[in-house]
Amino acid sequence: MAGHSAGAMDVRNVIGSLLLVYGVILTIMGLFGDKELDKTGNINANLIAGIALLVVGGIFTAWARLKPIVIPDDYVPDPDARPHH
C-alpha cells in the first residue's frame, strides 16, 4: 500500500521546531547573557534549559522523520461526517 506522509502537518514537526527555536534562544542567552547565578543557586538555568530543549526538540524532529505518518493514497474522508463548528 503506497501513500504519502503528513509532512509539515505532522504535529511532531511543529512541536520539535518550536522546542528547537526556544532551545537555541535559551542556549545563546545562557552562554552570552547575564547569568545572574546568585538567583539560581550558582546554576546557569538558561543554559541547562536550552540544552534540554535542544535535545527534546531533536528527538521530536528525528521521530517525525524516522517514523512518518503515512496517509494511504486511497484514503477518502467519511462523507457522512459533519465538520466541527
Image (tube, rainbow, N blue to C red):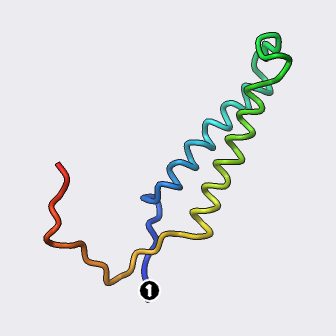
Side of 5 where 37 appears, left or right: right
Give the position of the N terminus as an image quadrant: bottom left
* Residue under the point 53% across and 48% down: 15
**Residue lying farthest bottom?**
1
Left or right: 30 as drawn, with respect to 25: right
Residue under circle 1?
2
Residue 4 percent across, percent down from the top left: 43, 76
Outermost residue to the right: 42
Q: Which residue type does callout 1 highlight?
A: Ala
SS assignment at label 1: loop
Q: How many marks?
A: 1
Tell me if residue 34 comes above or below residue 19 in the rendering: above
**Where is residue 2, by image quadrant?**
bottom left
| Quadrant position of residue 38 | top right
User: Label 1: few (<14), some or many (≥20) within 10 Å?
Assistant: few
Residue at the farthest top position: 38
Task: List x then y, in percent, for residue 78.
Answer: 21, 73
Q: Quadrant of the rendered structure where residue 22 is? A: top right
Instruction: Where is residue 8? Give x, y as percent.
Output: 46, 58
Q: Residue at x 57, y 63 (%)?
A: 64
Q: Vertical placement of 53 versus 70: above or below? A: above
Q: Which residue is drawn at the image coordinates 18% and 57% (left, top)?
A: 83
| Residue at 57% in and 47% down | 17
